[in-house]
Image (tube, helix red, strand yellow):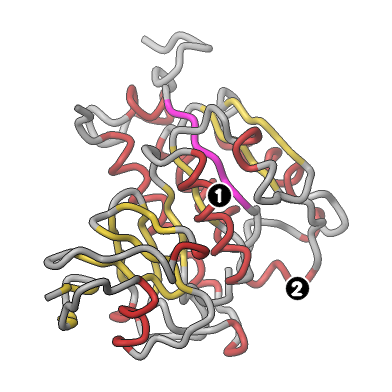
Amino acid sequence: MYIPGMKGNNPIFERNVPGTTEKLAKATVGIAGCGGLGSNAAVALLRAGIGRLILVDHDTVEASNLNRQHYFQADIGKKKVEALAAHLKAINPEVELVLHDLELTPENVPEIYADAELLIEAFDRADRKRWLIESWCVAFPDRPIVAASGVSGCGNTDGMHVHSSGNIHVCGDEESDMTMGLCAARVMMAACMQANVAIELLTGDKE
Amino acid sequence: MILVNNRDKVEWREGMTVQDVLDAMGYDYALITVTIEGTFVPEHDYETCTVPDGSKVGLFHLAHGG
């Protein structure tokens, strides 16, 4: 029986993979950037039943974002964290969202994500990806970070992979650069790979 | 011998650093993340952090786009 407010008990999760919903309902995941990777990974995590998301981005939605990011015409000009929060709540009103409309820096990462057990790296620029991974790994060496690298261009589906070492997981082809342009199918694929890795880690057996 | 990304073998030598492994691999990418046996190595340690013989090293190339 559905009891409103009881996490993991929501009827939208009736078709979920058995045993995953209860674990995901208790989880807090950080999302660093709400663009092509972050907005789509957040939607995938939400539909899987994640209980709490910490969303961070300082940008506003622009028309050129709509080729790959989970926003709509009516969102143009709105802050990304607020627009994304509205879309996530429209799918599952029970999700708990923590919104930060600010610029992430190496210094504020430990405080912003203090209670996130896993981070989705969802930046656009590689230099920012790099310092984010470093900040996270130094602050939280025992917590996983799921990043993306090489999500540009079209096709090359076979080139997409997950490269893992320790608590670092990188999804993408690790080569293609955004000077090639960005296509929804490939960016969303990488975002969903990130979400899928996160779900696997969060629902796996922990020692 | 050092194994990079579970694929490439690099001949080990005494005192070999992370930077030496990157040079041996011909990696001149500016944006790399490195692990040794799954443990993250900060960039400012590349010249000083030595890599034990038999280590598994992870090299991640970070590309723009998202």
Stretch of the chain drawn in magenta: A27-32
Q: Which residue is mark 1?
A: A135
Residue A154 location in percent, x, y? 47, 85
Q: Circle 1: is it few (<14), some (14-19), or many (20+) Cα within 10 Å?
A: some
Location of residue A72 in the rendering, given as x and y in whole percent from the top left corner:
73, 58
Report how many numbered discs are placed on residues in the image: 2
> On the rendered structure, is A199 left or right of A183?
left
x 82%, y 49%: residue: A79
Q: Label 2: which residue? A: A64
- Which residue type does callout 2 highlight? Ser
SS of the residue under disc 1? helix
Label 2 sits on a secondary structure element that is helix
How many residues crowd mark 2 within 10 Å: few (<14), some (14–19), many (20+)? few
Judging depth in this view, the residue of A117 and A13 nearest the camera is A117
Q: Quadrant of the C terminus of chain A?
A: top left
Instruction: Report x, y in % for residue A63.
Output: 79, 69
Say if A25 sits above or below A4 in the image: below
| Residue placed most toward the observer, A84 or A1 | A84
Check whether the beta carbons of the residues at disc 1 and disc 2 lie within 8 A of each other: no
In the rendered structure, the residue with mark 2 lies on which chain? A
In terms of depth relative to the viewer, which is nearer, B48 or A138? B48
Whether callout 1 and callout 2 share a subunit is answered yes
The single residue placed furthest to the front in the displayed view is B14
Chain to which mark 1 belongs: A
* Side of A21 where B12 appears, left or right: left
Q: Is residue A94 left or right of residue B15?
A: right
* Magenta highlight: main SS: strand
